[in-house]
Amino acid sequence: MCFNRLDIVMEQGISLERAISLVQNEKKKLPLEVVHLDNAHGRILGKDLISKVNDPRFDNSAMDGWAVRKEDCLEPNTSLQIIGINQAGNPQTNHINTGQACKIMTGAQIPTGANAIVMIEDSEIKGDIVIISGPARETYIRRKGENISKGDETLSVGHFMDPAAISLAATMGHEHIEVFSKPTVGIISTGDELIMPGSEINDYQIYESNSFGISSLVERIGGKPIRYETVADSLDKLRDALNHAAEHCDLIITTGGVSMGDFDIVRKLMELEGKINFWKVKMRPGGPPLFGKWQTIPIFGLPGNPVSSHLVFSMLVYPWFEASFCANTDSKLSLGRKVRVKMLNDVKGAQDKICLRRIKITSEGNNLVATTHTHQGSGNIHSMVAHNGLTLLPPNVDAKIGEIIDAFWFN
Ligand code: AMP
Ligand code: MG
């Protein structure tokens, strides 16, 4: 632990776990808003959803076929008198007596007196008689409430509204749902060398890429990104940009300028005028991230190297969203998941740091296996496209061919 220039306690060179807990301490209490299901995809549920109905709402047929009495169909090729037809969406008025059958469509209510269904394929119609050649099954009746009972809570606060969750909300009778308002996230890239893709470029310049990737990560997990203009390596310009962002954002993310270089202005300005909760995390790549507050707004200073900024987002910024959205492992809010993989290449770990090598995870027999392909440099964003996962190698641990290790598999 050490003190920065404002004598604010700052932790330095901490473990990833410690960094995550400091980040989550600064979670935002997000207000709720009501959205129509048409606009709910990708939103995070802010209030538990209780079913307004039973599902199924009534006993109904799982098959197109015949509603019968099972005891009438024990002998092969039984003939039954056809008394009518039940269609889904029509009120049910038919009653079956012994020796009778009612034609029934999938989803239609079961006629009174019937206790089983025969598939249409197992029957032949002759005038007003049906000859039954297959089994009459009770299991072809879907029972009232067998999926969900009225009053059940099937979706909880923090749930990521994916397509299945949206259909479930509709099944339960909800046209509108309460979701967390999207946190507004200001994204500011820094660096004199950066120029927008599509612009004329000089020999000493590079295309700015971080803000685009980080912005899509924010969007992907339910935030509202504002991608601000790139800021040159100037304390005054950065101060103006942060002040502006602090007026409009719930969270600020900068990229670049957090290491030890002469022009690492994010770190410098934060030391001079911000509050730093921690700087540097024991992870590779992505070692020098900074987290603190600009005025009252939480701010992440991500490293400039493109792989580092993406990985620090996944490992460290994502937990801020998770906490603010009250998400847990059941919530389906995620950028990926922890798995065990068998390495098909040797990979080197990192001294004193958790090592996040890019790996390609595939399944082979009963195992997930992992291979490495491109150059692993933290400047090589192509490595994030050519691979789909990361090693989670503990500090000072290498992995040899054939070893099974922890890994993170991006969704
Ligand atoms: P820095 O952390 O500012 O020293 O930057 C580290 C490396 O990442 C340098 O090679 C930068 O040119 C590069 N870099 C910084 N910001 C970006 C960005 N927004 N897009 C692409 N590369 C960047
Ligand atoms: Mg820079």
Image (spheres, rainbow, N blue to C red):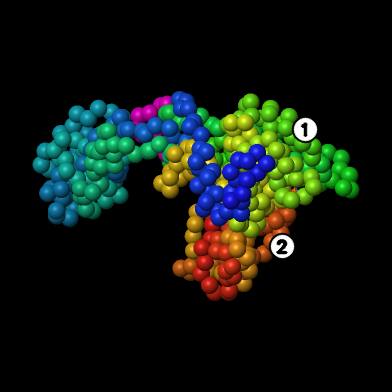
Report the Cα–Cα distance between label 2 and label 1. 37 Å
Q: Does 377 sit above or below residue 344?
A: above
Residue 331 is one of the magenta-drawn residues: no
Q: Position of residue 119 (x, y in %)?
A: 27, 48
Dot 2 crowding, Cα within 10 Å, few <14, some 14–19, many 20+: few
Residue type at numbered disc 2: His
Dot 2 and dot 1 residues touching (CB under 8 Å): no
Q: Does 134 sit above or below residue 242?
A: below
Q: Which label was assigned to residue 375?
A: 2
Residue located 51% across and 34% down the image: 28
Residue located 55% across and 55% down the image: 15
Badge 1 is on which residue?
Answer: 236
Instruction: Give the secondary structure at mark 2.
Output: loop
Residue that lies at the very extreme toward the left in this rendered image: 98
- Give the magenta part as a residue range: 165-176
Residue 170 is one of the magenta-drawn residues: yes
Front residue of 393/329: it is 393
Front residue of 52/301: it is 301
Front residue of 208/113: it is 208
Q: In terms of image quadrants, where is residue 256?
A: top right
* Res. 208 visible in picture: no
